[in-house]
Image (cartoon, rainbow, N blue to C red):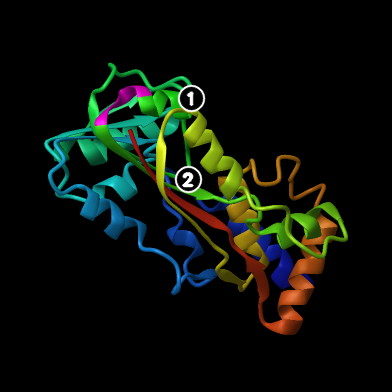
């Protein structure tokens, strides 16, 4: 068992990650979202009749490119410098202009420039989204909620938690409304996720370090071993995801 544990950690540590490509986790971290919404389908439907769209925090452009054909005036922002050339290589052949920004909060466009603003798992101030939308324009976002994988966070921090934190749906909705937007849809879901090996956790936390900012394989090795032993005994570790879907208009 010790040999398998060390091998899984080494595989995850040396696995490459770029953009928002999580294909390495296929078969290792399995999310069951059969009863939730279909974000790509919602956005494709919103494209109808739209001329200009802005995708906030496009990553490597993987998700936006999968939505093609795109509206004629499509822009994307990305604040992580290493993702910008990936996004440009993937999106510019589709006619998308990729704009590098200094932070996720930066929305460097003229007032009332877009019919639609979209973002998935990133964000920007509601006042900025309101500013760049035309009258009647729409905003669609999917966000990771406050309770996402709360069991994993508790395990890694050695906390004895028995329930997730309060939902962030209400506060997120209020932020949009206080920014001048009219919320037309606000939903959340809690899909179950099956983790099939401890390497998936290491890879996930390296790719998204803000989930457990203090995480390192060295300082958390003992707790990772406990998780590994649980997976070996039960065949999997069950986690609870938490996602928000909000739509708003100007």
Q: Can residue 194 be seen in this view?
A: yes
Q: Which quadrant of the figure contains the C terminus?
A: top left
Q: Is residue 1 visible?
A: no
Callout 1 secondary element: loop
237, above or below 8, in the image: below
Residue located 14% across and 36% down the image: 51
Residue located 41% across and 34% down the image: 181
User: Which circle's residue, 1 or 2, is located before the other in the chain?
Assistant: 1
In the image shown, does 156 or 56 lie closer to the viewer?
56
What's the distance in space between the residues labelled 1 and 2, CA to CA? Answer: 13 Å
Q: How many numbered discs, if any?
A: 2
Q: Main secondary structure of the magenta part?
A: strand
91, above or below 150, in the image: above
Residue 64 part of the magenta segment: no
138, above or below 143, in the image: above
In the image shown, does 89 or 169 lie closer to the viewer?
169
Residue located 47% across and 67% down the image: 26
State the image coordinates of residue 67 (x, y, percent, origin top left).
Answer: 24, 52
Highlighted range, magenta = 131-135
- In the image, taking residue 68 as reference, residue 148 lies left or right, namely right
State the image coordinates of residue 144 (x, y, percent, origin top left).
Answer: 54, 50
* Residue identified by numbered label 2: 121
State the image coordinates of residue 234 (x, y, percent, origin top left).
Answer: 72, 83
State the image coordinates of residue 16 (x, y, percent, origin top left).
Answer: 49, 49
Residue located 47% across and 39% down the image: 122
How many residues crowd around disc 1 within 10 Å: few (fewer than 14), some, or many (20 or more)? some
* Residue identified by numbered label 1: 105
Quarter holding residue 60:
top left
* Disc on res. 25: none
Callout 2 secondary element: loop
Do callouts 1 and 2 mark residues in contact (Cβ within 8 Å)? no
């Amino acid at each position: 068992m010790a040999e398998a544990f060390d091998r899984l950690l080494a595989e995850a540590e040396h696995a490459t990650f770029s953009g928002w490509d999580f294909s390495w986790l296929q078969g290792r971290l399995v999310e069951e979202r059969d009863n939730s919404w279909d974000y790509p389908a919602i956005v494709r439907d919103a494209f109808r009749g739209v001329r200009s769209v802005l995708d906030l925090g496009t990553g490597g452009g993987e998700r936006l490119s999968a939505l093609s054909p795109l509206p004629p005036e499509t822009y994307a922002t990305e604040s992580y410098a290493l993702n910008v050339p990936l996004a440009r290589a993937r999106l510019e052949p589709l006619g998308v202009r990729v704009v590098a920004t200094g932070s996720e909060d930066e929305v460097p466009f003229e007032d009332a420039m877009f019919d639609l603003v979209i973002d998935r798992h990133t964000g920007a101030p509601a006042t900025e989204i309101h500013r760049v939308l035309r009258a009647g324009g729409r905003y669609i976002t999917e966000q990771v909620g406050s309770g996402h994988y709360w069991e994993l966070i508790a395990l890694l921090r050695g906390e004895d938690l028995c329930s997730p934190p309060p939902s962030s749906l209400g506060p997120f909705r209020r932020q949009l409304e206080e920014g001048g937007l009219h919320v037309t849809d606000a939903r959340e879901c809690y899909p179950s996720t099956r983790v099939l090996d401890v390497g998936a956790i290491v890879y996930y936390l390296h790719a998204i370090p803000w989930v457990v900012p203090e995480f390192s394989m060295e300082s958390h090795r003992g707790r990772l071993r406990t998780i590994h032993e649980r997976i070996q005994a039960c065949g999997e570790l069950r986690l609870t995801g938490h996602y928000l879907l909000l739509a708003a208009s100007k």
